[in-house]
Image (cartoon, rainbow, N blue to C red):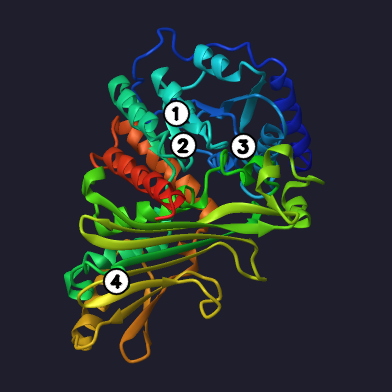
């Protein structure tokens, strides 16, 4: 009986607090200055700034002892924040493991100034319109807030210096500016990284060529998708590359991050380590009916009119970057289609080529759309020795229950138990938990900030080159 009325109770809590969003006490009285975290219960106080992407809600899909259940939301108003609140209410009212968030929502044109002046929290979550996100990041760290930001942090080469400045200010003010890299928590990606560091299995990473890069990654996404059990309603601005960003600076953020994280683990990378060889961009065409299915809008808004050809929307959501990183040739590709075939969803392909073997993640029909890691030995390699090394190493990894199956004459696949496949949405909780650890320690790993800067230099420089048609 109590559970059945929970959705109504949650709704009342949020609406009542929404009407008195400007009454509360600041968590800090003296402006700037880093707050010391100890890991104590409820010491982290979240602020959600202008939520426009569903990733903002996924940070709160789970509860955390260290995070206070009272969350302050600052927004200019409109459908974006209403959808965000509905998602939080859905988590609060679900039958299994419901959350207990209390959202205090302020809506008004002065939402940013209000957030900066009231200082009701100590960690700002930013996930929404990417055209204004970099400015949000800079102003938040200037005001002494820690920031957990959705990708991408920046979408143009012109804005990139502003991001560099934001990191400098964060360091000066003793706060942590960090982006949400969920793909590092995929079990197959973790295994690919770990096996690539075993010389007796992978050998050394090849340097590769433009025709056959040492690293190749492809990420396929869909505009029509389910999130937390419901069909996602996307805001119209999501299809405007001036607000969302082109695919070459959006989804490729994850891929460029994985290239750095897997191939140069715990190493500091700099802009001088990057050389963009080629970059290209191309549109996904959406019909007005498809646009309506994902936005619930009957017609294209005025700001999208310039991108319409023959009544179809041209969304530059696709991009490819061929580049060198510390002399290693890598290629990353982002592709967006309208809707996946039955049983499929967003997918990831990745291959690392070594002197002994290639480590390949596939997620196609043969894998039943389940990401699967394969190990293929190069010609002339001692298969018996590699197999023995694989069997030995798999038993020592933190991921337990892995099974090695032979594939063809020169390969194996790693069978991962279902309990380790938590899914994309659960990765947001894992990233948040890691960020809480960093807050408690008071610092990020030495390589994180320089590598974030290098990552966004790569994506924005590639977009600039692609627009020049080179």
**Upstream in sequence: badge 1 or badge 2:** 1
Determine crowd level at label 3: few under 14, some 14-19, many 20+ residues with C-alpha closer than 10 A.
many
Is the Cβ of the residue at disc 3 closer than 8 Å to that at disc 2?
A: no
* Above/below status of 325 relative to 122: below
Between the C-alphas of marks 1 and 2, the distance is 8 Å
Q: Nearer the viewer, residue 214 or 305?
A: 305
Q: Which residue is mark 2?
A: 149
Residue 300: percent from left, percent from top = 75, 45
Between the C-alphas of marks 1 and 4, the distance is 41 Å
Which numbered circle lies on residue 344?
none
Q: Which mark is nearer the camera, 3 or 4?
A: 3
Identity of the residue furthest to the right in this view: 298
Under circle 2, the secondary element is strand
**Upstream in sequence: badge 1 or badge 4:** 1
Q: Nearer the viewer, residue 262 or 122?
A: 262
Is the Cβ of the residue at disc 1 closer than 8 Å to that at disc 2?
A: yes
Which numbered circle lies on residue 394?
4
Determine crowd level at label 2: few under 14, some 14-19, many 20+ residues with C-alpha closer than 10 A.
many
- Seen in the image, is 275 located left or right of residue 240? left
**Upstream in sequence: badge 2 or badge 4:** 2
Which numbered circle lies on residue 137?
1
Between the C-alphas of marks 3 and 4, the distance is 41 Å
- Seen in the image, is 275 located left or right of residue 181? left
Quadrant where the image shows the N terminus: top right
Under circle 1, the secondary element is helix
Query: Residue shown at 64%/66% (left/top)?
Result: 340
Query: Residue shown at 51%/33% (left/top)?
Result: 126
Between the C-alphas of marks 1 and 3, the distance is 15 Å
Under circle 4, the secondary element is helix
Is the Cβ of the residue at disc 1 closer than 8 Å to that at disc 3?
A: no
The answer to whether residue 243 is seen in the rendering is yes
Q: Which residue is mark 3?
A: 52
């Amino acid at each position: 009986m109590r559970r059945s009325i929970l959705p109504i109770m949650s709704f009342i809590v949020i609406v009542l607090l929404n009407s008195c969003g400007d009454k509360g006490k600041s968590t800090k009285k003296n402006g700037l200055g880093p707050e010391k975290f100890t890991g104590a219960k409820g010491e982290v106080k979240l602020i959600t700034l202008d939520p426009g992407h569903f990733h903002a809600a996924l940070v709160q899909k789970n509860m955390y002892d260290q995070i206070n259940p009272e969350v302050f939301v600052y927004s200019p108003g409109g459908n974006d924040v209403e959808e965000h609140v509905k998602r939080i209410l859905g988590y609060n009212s679900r039958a299994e493991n419901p959350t207990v968030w209390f959202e205090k929502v302020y809506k008004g044109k002065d939402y940013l100034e209000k957030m900066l002046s009231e200082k009701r929290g100590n960690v700002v979550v930013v996930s929404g319109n990417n055209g204004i996100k970099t400015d949000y990041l800079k102003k938040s760290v200037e005001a002494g807030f820690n920031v957990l930001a959705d990708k991408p942090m920046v979408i143009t080469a012109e804005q990139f210096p502003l991001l560099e400045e934001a990191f400098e200010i964060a360091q000066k003010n003793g706060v942590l500016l960090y982006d949400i890299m969920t793909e590092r928590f995929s079990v197959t990606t973790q295994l690919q990284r770990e096996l690539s560091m075993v010389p007796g299995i992978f050998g050394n990473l090849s340097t590769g060529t433009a025709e056959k890069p040492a690293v190749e990654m492809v990420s396929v996404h869909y505009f029509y998708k389910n999130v937390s059990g419901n069909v996602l309603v996307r805001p119209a601005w999501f299809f405007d590359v001036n607000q969302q960003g082109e695919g070459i600076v959006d989804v490729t953020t994850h891929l460029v991050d994985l290239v750095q994280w897997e191939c140069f683990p715990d190493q500091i990378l700099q802009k001088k380590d990057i050389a963009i060889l080629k970059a290209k961009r191309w549109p996904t065409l959406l019909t007005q009916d498809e646009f309506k299915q994902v936005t619930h809008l009957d017609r294209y808004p005025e700001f999208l009119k310039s991108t319409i050809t023959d009544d179809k929307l041209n969304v530059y959501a696709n991009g490819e970057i061929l580049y060198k990183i510390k002399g290693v040739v890598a290629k990353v590709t982002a592709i967006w289609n309208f809707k996946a075939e039955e049983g499929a969803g967003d997918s990831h392909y990745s291959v690392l080529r070594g002197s002994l073997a290639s480590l390949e993640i596939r997620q196609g029909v043969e894998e039943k759309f389940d990401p699967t890691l394969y190990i293929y030995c190069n010609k002339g390699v001692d298969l018996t020795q590699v197999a023995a090394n694989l069997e030995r190493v798999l038993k020592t990894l933190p991921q337990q229950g892995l099974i090695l199956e032979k594939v063809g004459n020169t390969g194996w696949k790693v069978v991962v138990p279902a309990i380790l496949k938590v899914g994309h949405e659960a990765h947001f909780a894992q990233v948040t938990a890691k960020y809480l650890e960093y807050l408690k320690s008071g610092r990020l790993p030495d390589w994180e900030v320089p590598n974030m800067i290098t990552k966004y230099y790569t994506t924005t420089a590639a977009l600039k080159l692609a627009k020049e048609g080179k």
